[in-house]
Amino acid sequence: MASEMVKLPVVSLTRAPAGELSVPSALVAGPLREPLLHALVQSQLAARRAGSAATKTRAFVSGGGKKPWRQKGTGRARSGSSRSPVWVGGAVIFGPQPRDYGYRLPKSARRAALRAALAARHADGRLLVVDALTLPEAKTKRMHELLEGLGLGGADALVVLAAADETVQRAARNLARVKVIPEGGINVYDVLRYSHLVITRAALERLASRLAGDDA
């Protein structure tokens, strides 16, 4: 049985109608699935942690090679090293060590979460499909004018292209509230982080072919 289709309006860079694009309903009209979205975002943020925190065990603390005092007869507790964890300036017991905090959810879960994120933007009316997106030069002013033409001046937006475009990416680099990525780099965290999602027709077609076939 063929999956149901949803027609999305396509606009030009001046927000004029430029046709429609039919995509599987599972791509933009599925359930929200908040627990899955939360799990995916946590996974992405965990993978971005530096994991560089480190403390010195007694094997790495310098000094302490000589026994501080003789074993018996001093009236003090016996001690074998001034770098013992119980001494000031000594080692740290069970302290953090460099590690990788990243973990990955199953592929089907990652795809389902991305579909849910796209559905959330579509339900909010903040998914904008443009026929094409190019700039004559890599100037911030040009990118600002493009967003103004789309009615997104001053708004934060994630712009998704079918393929990397250095001109567009450089033009948006100085706009703190705008991020430009190729279709292959789209992810749940960025889709949810930015209020508006602007995606080209070609990018959405590629995304649909990549995600719509998985029913998870």
Image: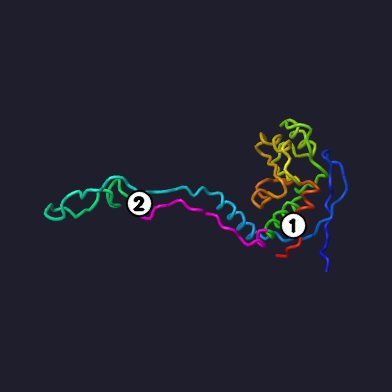
Q: Amino acid at mark 2?
A: Thr
| Percent x, y of residue 51 | 49, 49
| Percent x, y of residue 191 | 68, 49
Q: Quadrant of residue 135?
A: top right
At x 74%, y 51%, the residue is 124
In the displayed image of the protein, which residue is found farthest to the bottom? 1
Image disc number at residue 57 = 2
111 displayed left or right of 45? right
- Which quarter of the image is occupied by the C terminus? bottom right
176 displayed left or right of 78? right
Q: Secondary structure at mark 2?
A: loop
Q: Amino acid at mark 1?
A: Arg
Highlighted range, magenta: 92-110
Among numbered discs 1 and 2, the one appearing first in the sequence = 2
Q: Secondary structure at mark 1?
A: helix
- Which quarter of the image is occupied by the N terminus? bottom right
- The one nearer the camera, 209 or 159, is 209
- Separation of residues labelled 1 and 2 (CA atoms): 48 Å
| Percent x, y of residue 64 | 26, 47
- The one nearer the camera, 50 or 117, is 50
Image disc number at residue 210 = 1
